[in-house]
């Protein structure tokens, strides 16, 4: 638990930067699992600062984003491709071919095969070194909504009504928020060598308490993280305020 989200985000960014540099030193690639949304923005901001001011290179970085709305065109304002370019990818020297974000334009017949291939691609790099997560008020991680299985893989899912309500501001009304998304599964996330779930402010306090102290259940997919030895919750004081 950190006093502020800023301090926590800077620490997380420095951990990622150390991973990138130690992999670089060994001639290896750093494989990062990335999230979008409000939560990781300051982590990306610090990574961009480290690139600009301290020479951190992303040449040996490979990224896999957790999710994308479906259907969604990559150039749309609300796409996670647009988000990642704006906050990170267009601001650092990562090679374009190292970036993976689920494709929201795949046609319905091909989406299953597409998701299986995404899963295989993650494995082909030897799995994720670090997976960053936020948490939704439904208890989702990625877009693994209530009802998700602990061994689920990358797949097309239906978004929870609360998730669509929370996204309504970005889309100018809930009716414009896609009803589906492609997401890495809980099982995909679990294979990461390190999982870092971040949550800031009092709006997340209730779900954070359930995720950490509640009974493990498909109703709150984030409770599955209690079963992992490789997970850390990084919180600000407000998000941690209801923990006993
Ligand atoms: C985003 C994602 C979601 C968000 C969650 C929290 O890629 O997978 O699980 O992390 O909805 O969103 P924010 O950070 O906007 O509160």
Image: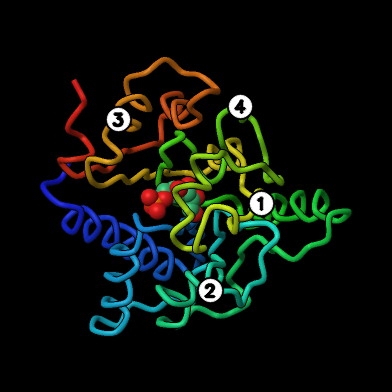
Quadrant of image for the N terminus: top left
Q: List x then y, in percent, for residue 97.
A: 63, 76
Marked residue nearer the N-terminal end (3 or 2): 2
Distance between the alpha carbons at the discs numbered 2 and 4 = 29 Å
Does the beta carbon of the residue at mark 1 sit less than 8 Å from ligand 1? no
Q: Is label 1 or label 3 in front?
A: 3
Residue ID for mark 1: 182
Residue 220 lies, with reference to residue 84, above or below; the image says above
Residue ID for mark 3: 206
Q: Is label 2 or label 1 in front?
A: 2
Q: Is 21 or 244 nearer to us in this picture?
A: 244
Residue ID for mark 4: 147
Can residue 146 be seen at all in this image of the molecule? Answer: yes
What residue sits 42% from the left and 57% below the top? 37
Q: How many marks?
A: 4
What residue sits 34% from the left and 54% below the top? 39
What residue sits 74% from the left and 51% below the top? 115
Judge from the rendering whether residue 202 lies leftward or rightward of residue 184; answer left or right.
left
Q: List x then y, in percent, for residue 236.
A: 19, 45
Judge from the rendering whether residue 192 lies leftward or rightward of residue 187; answer left or right.
left
> Any mark on residue 77, and which?
2
What residue sits 58% from the left and 50% below the top? 127
Quadrant of image for the C terminus: top left
Can residue 132 be seen at all in this image of the molecule? Answer: no
Q: Is 224 or 28 nearer to us in this picture?
A: 224
């Amino acid at each position: 638990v950190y006093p502020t989200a800023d301090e926590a985000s800077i620490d997380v960014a420095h951990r990622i930067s150390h991973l990138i540099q130690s992999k670089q030193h060994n001639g290896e690639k750093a494989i990062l699992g990335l999230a979008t949304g409000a939560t990781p923005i300051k982590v990306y901001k610090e990574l961009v600062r480290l690139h600009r001011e301290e020479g951190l290179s992303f040449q040996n970085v490979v990224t896999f984003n957790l999710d994308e709305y479906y259907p969604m065109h990559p150039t749309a304002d609300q796409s996670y491709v647009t988000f990642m370019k704006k906050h990170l990818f267009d601001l650092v020297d990562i090679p374009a071919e190292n970036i993976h974000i689920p494709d929201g334009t795949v046609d319905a017949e091909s989406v299953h095969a597409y998701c299986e291939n995404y899963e295989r691609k993650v494995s082909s790099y030897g799995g994720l070194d670090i997976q960053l997560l936020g948490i939704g008020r439904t208890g989702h991680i990625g877009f693994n909504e209530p009802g998700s299985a602990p061994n689920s893989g990358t797949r097309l899912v239906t978004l929870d009504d609360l998730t669509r309500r929370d996204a309504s501001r970005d889309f100018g009304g809930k009716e414009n928020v896609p009803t589906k998304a492609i997401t890495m599964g809980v099982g995909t996330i679990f294979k990461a060598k390190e999982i870092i779930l971040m949550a800031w402010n009092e709006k997340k306090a209730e779900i954070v308490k359930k995720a950490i102290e509640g009974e493990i259940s498909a109703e709150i997919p984030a409770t599955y993280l209690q079963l992992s030895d490789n997970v850390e919750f990084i919180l600000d004081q407000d998000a941690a305020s209801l923990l006993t």
